[in-house]
Amino acid sequence: MKRLYFLVFIILCVEISFGQVVINELDSDTPGTDTQEFIELKSNAPNFSLDGLVLVLFNGSSSGGDSSYFTLDLDGFSTDANGIFLIGGPEVSPVPDFVLFENTIQNGTDAAAIYLGNEEDYPEGTVATTANLLDAIIHDTDDADDTGLMTLLGLMEQINENENNNKTTESIQRKNDGTYEVKTPTPGIPNDGSGVQFNGIMISTQFDEYNEGDSIDIVFTTEMNITSNLAFDFTITNGSFTTSDYSGSTSVTIPTGMNTVTTTIQIINDNDNEGDEVMRITFGSIPSDFVRLNDNKEIRIIDDDFTVASWGSPLNPTFGNVSNTALVNYYDSLEGLSDGALAQAIQDIIADPAVVRTHSYADIVEILSSADQSPENSNQVWLLYTEQNRSKLDFAGFTDASDSWNREHTYPRSRGEFNNYREFDDIADGMSGFFTTNADSLRHANSDAHGLRATDSNENSSRGNQHYGEYNGPTANQGSWKGDVARGIFFLVIRYKALQVVNGFPEDTDNSISELGDLTTLVDWHRNDPPDDFEMNRNNIIYTWQFNRNPFIDQPDLVEYIWGNNVGQTWSNTLSIDENDKSEVLIYPNPVNDYLMVSTKGKQGDLEIFDTLGNLLITHHFNESTKIDINLSSGLYLLRIKHNNISEMRRIVIK
């Protein structure tokens, strides 16, 4: 009996001890940003160990089912001299004791709870419970009460963070009597303003971006003058930005009676093309009576040693400068085929399960950084739709931030019904990490680089899942992307059996799933914006990853045989190939539809087209890369090329 009483006594002591920890403040909704949200815990005793506790966040929406969506094991943490432990986003000030990814804390009818236990006790999807519960709060942003969640957590109240109708940020704060009020946030300090007052220290620089060779003045400032010398170290290395990239001391001292110190770092111009880099200024250890108002301040270092490609951007296209890296016999199996047999033969090449590979959605960032690299600056990517450059460093990830770029599915994922992410999609394991795939593997369309492009994040959002023709790009765009998109769509609908491109704009119904329009528009875009060097280079790079190519870039006339003017005709890729291979002037496509491309390497001259009776029909000057519109009847014609006192004759077929 004595032993039983002793055990009960120990259990009560543990519960009373942990019962000191409560949710002291919560800010789930910070308008305009998801980086300043936080949860603050408080213990009655200062410097209190949080071992054995876990914070669990619950989703009270109809889809969330009152189950957990985030869990944080608090082992190894403790509160500060005021009994405060701060958990928050990357821009919360003072710097949280545990920094969350942006947009971690949901707003709506949700809950935060502290439990006895460990992270593994509350896996994602755990339904809210009162078992081992120490404290909880249900919060909302002008949402109806979730009585089910209240019952599960044993609470009688749900707190509206927006109850004051204040459009500026406010938070839910626990008062000393255990009730709550909504007012201006006070992260990191007691809600009533009492307790130990810490001296805040922050990092600042004049600019957030510098060039190689620049000097950077880093300023450290405290809120109050210090009473004794404050000496500390900081670091600025980060990833590829190492000690070889700068000179200068990373140790500073703020003298007694002062509140600031400045140190100068010299960025070394090493003449190496390392790409733009990020220097991260991070505090070392500082005394316990100081708090960091900011930390991990990122400074972009612009590398001036970028390279410029020998070919143009889609706005200033060149042709024939980038060689096709396909195997010589890559398309041999298409010869002599037409209609469905031709389409099937293409699919057999680009979806061959014995050859073709698929990579993760995370790997797409690396692939696009190379495949969509700007010809004008190797440190930037070229953005579809908005037709502009953007730094590779400005990748947005899973949020669409302004002035960033993201991965755009040219065939909208919602229309293709590509499956949700699975475990491997979040892992970027590089070129050596891949899965086999086939024409039925629609799931893999989610990460097929031929159907993904770098785009402006905001334009990515506004484009949505509109059909092409409904969507024509942002205002004043020049349409340099339209042929690229068309050929990407044509690739996908041959590569994956479930996808379809159709005429018109199918309404969003169960019957229109996997249908994308408008076919007529896309064929016209393909004809008016022929594949250029940028696309060929892109095709070559993706080929090294996925072991398949987009045939409508390599052989653009295939579009006509599948969807255009040559449906029903037999495909042949033999005409004039030898002539082109031997010449310094490349003429394509052949057979000709609406236009003829003349591509040279630094040469200029004149081109003449004759009928078989010798009548001169067209004369046109060419220089580097020239597009010649053709308006002639179908048939065989002779073409004469004159350059550098050389005259060559070719045969062309006009369809």
Image (cartoon, rainbow, N blue to C red):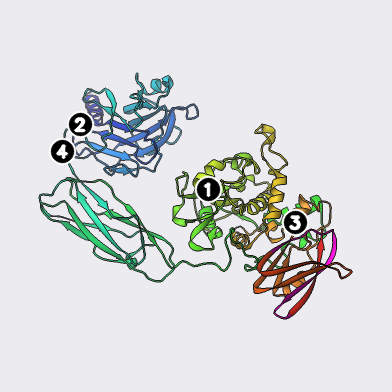
Query: What segment carries the magenta color?
Result: 627-645
Relative to 627, is 451 on the left or the right?
Answer: left
Relative to 565, is 379 on the left or the right?
Answer: left
Q: Nearer the viewer, mark 4 or mark 1?
A: 4
Q: Which residue is mark 1?
A: 425
Instruction: Report crowding for label 3: few under 14, some 14 to 19, many 20 or more residues within 10 A (C-alpha).
Output: many
Magenta span: predominant SS is: strand
- Rounded to the nearest angstrom, the CA distance separating label 4 from label 1 is 47 Å
Q: Which mark is residue 558?
A: 3
Give amino acid for label 3: Leu
Residue 215, position in %: x, y?
29, 64
Q: Which residue is mark 2?
A: 44
Circle 4 — which element? Answer: loop
Q: Which residue is mark 4?
A: 196
Q: Quadrant of residue 159?
A: top left
- Rounded to the nearest angstrom, the CA distance separating label 4 from label 2 is 14 Å
